[in-house]
Amino acid sequence: MDHLSASQMNLYFQCSLKYKFQYIDKLPKPFKASGLIFGSAIHSAISWFHKNQLTGRNVPVEKLFSIFNADWYGQKVESVIRYKETETETALLLLGRELLNLYYHQPKALVKGTEVPFTVPLVNPRNGENLRMNLEGFIDLLEENDSIVEFKTSVKTIDLKDVNLQLTAYSYAYEMLYGKRPRNLRVVNFLKLKKPKMISLEAKNGTIDHQRFFNLAEAALKGIRSGVFFPRHSWWCDGCEFVEPCRAWDGK
Ligand code: SF4
């Protein structure tokens, strides 16, 4: 294990056995959920759009649709896509276009970076204790006004509590990199509804706690290093790629 990320932490706290299958055993995934493919294709199109914005190039909205489609079909070649009962590929491709169209036509701030990678040490803010483990990740969008933006696609409005760990990781990394906290942390939530919608949610003051984040990172690392892995059955098992190995798992 050479680094920790917010998504690794989230997965470890959600189901530590799934974490083991994915990150330690590196088991192949028999399928990819359509929601993941869709979110990744939206991210690719938006990132490409902002890369052009950074170089001062205006791009037509149709080019975003092309990037979305190219990413979708690229992933389709590599993985079996598992759709929900009510979904079809055609409808999802159309939905992607509509959401990108909404994003393209909204007013935008000046951009400082897109898909910004970071690698920062995990250091206790209270006493300087260094966990000797880096936190790694990508910030979807950094705006000139010190705002961090995360893009999420979902069928229901995101609850900010569910993305708090991720936003706090970005805030922590930002402070380590720039010596100050971001001005604000926003989630742009693309809603996959019959009438597609895009909403902006901002993390409230007092909800971003770097000390608590460090403590959670330390707890996750302790659990992983000690080999503490067990199944945690809940509604998310429906979409789990490791149902078979989970059933066969004998506790060792
Ligand atoms: S099926 Fe459920 S309990 Fe088993 S590994 Fe997957 S998420 Fe965890």
Image: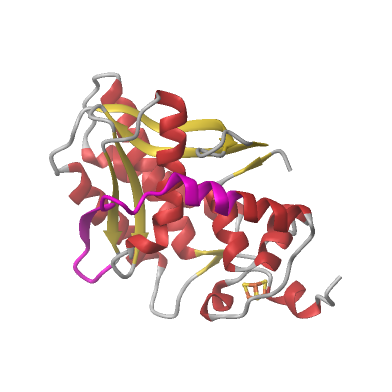
In the drawing, does residue 110 fall left or right of residue 119? left
Return the x and y of residue 145 as percentages of the image width and height.
22, 29
* Residue found 29% across the figure and 23% down from its top: 54
- Ligand 1: which quarter? bottom right
Return the x and y of residue 71 as percentages of the image width and height.
45, 46
**Residue farthest toward the top in the current orientation of the protein:** 55
Q: Is residue 178 above or below residue 226?
A: above
Number of numbered labels in the structure image: 0
In the drawing, does residue 35 fall left or right of residue 94? right
Front in this rendered view, residue 26 or 221: 221
Front in this rendered view, residue 22 or 30: 22
In the drawing, does residue 224 fall left or right of residue 111? right
* Residue found 39% across the figure and 45% down from its top: 43
* Residue found 84% across the figure and 77% down from its top: 250
Location of residue 120 by image quarter: top right
Look at the image and tell me in which quarter the C terminus lies.
Answer: bottom right
Q: Is residue 25 above or below residue 244?
A: above
Return the x and y of residue 152 as percentages of the image width and height.
36, 55
Look at the image and tell me in which quarter the N terminus lies.
Answer: top right
**Residue farthest toward the front in the current orientation of the protein:** 127
Q: Can residue 16 be seen by looking at this rendering?
A: yes
Task: State how the image is colored.
Answer: secondary structure
The magenta stretch is: 193-217
Q: Can residue 69 be seen by looking at this rendering?
A: no
Front in this rendered view, residue 56 or 235: 235
- In the image, is residue 198 part of the stretch drawn in magenta? yes
Front in this rendered view, residue 210 or 133: 210
- In the image, is residue 53 part of the stretch drawn in magenta? no
Return the x and y of residue 181 as percentages of the image width and height.
34, 34
